[in-house]
Amino acid sequence: MKNNRRTFIKSLGLASVGAATGISISSARAEKVKWKMVTSWPKNFPGLGAGAETLASYINQLSGGSLKVKVFGANELVPPLGVFDYVSSGGAEMGHSGAYYWKGKTAAAQFFSSVPFGMTAQEMNSWLYYGNGLQLWEKVYEKFNLVPRAAGNTGVQMGGWFNKEINSADDLKGLKMRIPGLGGEVLARAGGTPFTLAGAEIFTSLQTGVIDATEWVGPYNDRAFGLHKAAKFNYYPGWHEPGPSLECIINKEAYMSLSKVHQKVIDLSCKAANIDMISDYMSKNYQALEFFKKEKVQIKQFPKEVLIKLKNISKDVLKDLSTTDPISKEVFDSYSNFLNSVRPWTILSEDSYLNSTK
């Protein structure tokens, strides 16, 4: 599978990019550029870390080797949550992370990762590519000297790992949980205490009782971290991240210094990596889920009462976020209007089909 993918991308090459864009490729062939990419993930970590490597490989192959990107895992050059500032300042030309980590920089960034009870991956990609989501994302990041691109998606995540059962909304009160972004704000209003921890810190924090629960991604990544050894219960669905987009951020000055062909190489490679990641997760999650079942992990569904409570709180959180500043209101309106437009089709098509197969 991987070899076939590499062969396909390599066969495209600069000539195909040039033909598709009508741009001369002679300057791109002559141009030899070496970039660094810093990430928020452990080096080669399944899914997320591998996604950054895949993106770099696509750029290298599609450029015919004239634009090479070297990937640095979390803590190799900067801490996991230092990616945004490092790329913004030009320490590295590219970064691979999640936009919700930067809510302290700009509240609107959170819309470009995942919204509780919001868009699925398919809806999110539609908003970014065929709504005005990407244009708004660029507008939000412009003052930070960054160019954002979607570069991965995990699909609907699991609800997290817990060391106590969640039988009612009252069980959320006092709960110490690693859950970043808007999901963390929802938990806080439900009476819990959210933590933002880098991936490498999760297992030890859960095992030692620093936190009572954690969300991470889903079976594929959760197995890699051994979270089933540190918690008793694995809950679903992932109400907080129904379609989380991963980002490639690019230093704007570095991006603008490239030839038009190399800019297009990056843009197309990000799109390819975006599709590749969610395909990878779909192919691996079910395998890890079967492993958890054999390990007798208690996989439980959140009670309806809990989900209703969280959904109602989410509405208030988003409403308050939209009043933070004008750009947050602009993004919120665009996101909400697009979701309200496409969701009836999602329900009519995918929901009805899946329900018919039960």
Image: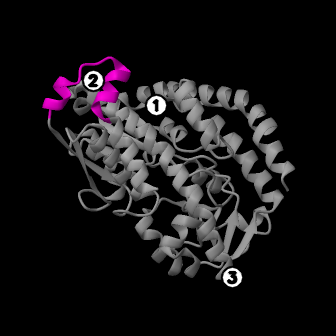
Q: Which residues are magenta?
A: 13-31
Q: Position of residue 125 (x, y in %)?
A: 56, 36
Quadrant of the frame with the C terminus: bottom right
Residue at horizontal 54%, vertical 68%?
222
Residue hosting label 1: 137
Which residue is at 84% across, 50% downward?
A: 355
235, above or below 265, in the image: below
Whole-percent x, y for residue 43 in the image: 33, 63
The amino acid sitting under disc 3 is Lys
Does the stretch in magenta take in 322? no
Q: Nearer the viewer, mark 1 or mark 3?
A: 3
Task: Quickly name the residue at label 2.
Answer: 260
Instruction: Give the dominant element type of the magenta stretch: helix, strand or loop.
Output: helix
Query: Which amino acid type is marked by label 2?
Result: Lys
Q: Earlier in the sequence, mark 2 or mark 3?
A: 2
Give the quadrant of residue 335.
top right
Q: Nearer the viewer, mark 2 or mark 1?
A: 2
The residue closer to the viewer here, 149 or 321, is 149
